[in-house]
Image (spheres, rainbow, N blue to C red):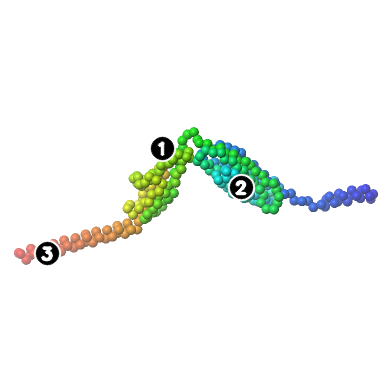
Amino acid sequence: MPPSRLGIALLVLALVTLPVSEAQPSIGLSGPSQTFQGNTGENVTSYIRVYNGGNRTGEYSISVTGNISSFVRLERESVEILPGENKKIRIYYSLPTMPCTLTGVIVVSLSGGQIVPAVSRSINVVVTRPTANRAPFLNITSPANGSVVRGRVVVRITSHDPDGDPVKVSIYIDGSKVSEGDEYVWKTSRWSNGVHTVVATASDGELNTSAVAQVTVHNVISTLRAMVFASVMGVIVLASFVLRRFLGRRHLKGDCETT
């Protein structure tokens, strides 16, 4: 074989036998725009998609920076993605109750020692006060609906107004107002055993909201008192019956002696 052809053959053989380096995973980030306008106190859900454009499994970490980070919760902060796969990560926004502008950055990076440039997406949210007034949010945190209570029970109410207006809270038990505030110590021993209705109302001066919880009062002391009372009454009735019989016999005996 001529030298020129031999050299070409060796070069081709060397190229064929060279080791093929494994491609690094590439990071992809897609999804809807994270630039929007929201109302004060509003809850908004969005998402991003993280995908693996390489041919190796990658562990991705997700984070949010900026002043919006206090109002953002990620569905998860890390995710493993197979080659060619993508996964949807939800983003939950709980917007503040005062108008403001929030900015931040979503950063997705590949964990581990592999050097792969991170990708990011900006977040810009303008939080505005809605034109129409909205009713306050209200919840009876304790006692729970359907629960059984006894003794001293703390009735707790949580409330807030999505427009930032002051909220007035009132608590009712069986239709009677017992408190004007978000907490009330209920002495159930003064109430009968059985089902009672706790109602809480919240007002921003224009709109009202209410919440209801039905609970069962079961005071052992009250039950014992009822049993003792019933026993005492039984003794009194029995004693009265015996006394009447005894006096009746004496009266009959006296009549016999006088005849």
| Amino acid of disc 1 | Gly
Q: Tag 3, which secondary structure?
A: helix
Which callout, 1 or 3, points at the residue further toward the start of the chain?
Answer: 1
Q: Tag 2, which secondary structure?
A: strand
Q: Please identify, in this view, whether the residue under mark 1 or under mark 3 is nearer the observer.
A: 1
Task: Report the Cα–Cα distance between label 2 and label 3.
Answer: 98 Å
Which callout, 1 or 2, points at the residue further toward the start of the chain?
Answer: 2
Q: Residue at image x 95%, y 49%?
A: 2
Q: Quadrant of residue 232?
A: bottom left
Q: Residue at image x 17%, y 62%?
A: 243
Decide which of 10, 171 is in the foreground and name it: 171
Instruction: Mark 3: give few (<14), some (14-19) or many (20+) Cα within 10 Å.
Output: few
Q: Are marks 1 and 2 in contact (CB under 8 Å)?
A: no
Give the labeled residue for mark 2. Answer: 63
Left-right relation of 138 to 242: right
Q: Does residue 133 appear anywhere in the picture?
A: yes
Q: Residue furthest top?
A: 131
Task: Report the Cα–Cα distance between label 1 and label 2.
Answer: 41 Å
Q: Tag 1, which secondary structure?
A: loop
Decide which of 242, 146 is in the foreground and name it: 146
Give the labeled residue for mark 1. Answer: 205
Q: Does residue 92 appear anywhere in the picture?
A: no
Give the labeled residue for mark 3. Answer: 250
Task: Report the Cα–Cα distance between label 1 and label 3.
Answer: 77 Å
Q: Please identify, in this view, whether the residue under mark 2 or under mark 3 is nearer the observer.
A: 2
Instruction: Measuring from the top left, give residue 60's x and y in whole percent.
Output: 65, 49
| Amino acid of disc 2 | Ser
Q: Quadrant of residue 165?
A: top left
Instruction: Measuring from the top left, give residue 188's x and y in whole percent.
Output: 35, 53
| Amino acid of disc 3 | Arg
Decide which of 104, 211 is in the foreground and name it: 104
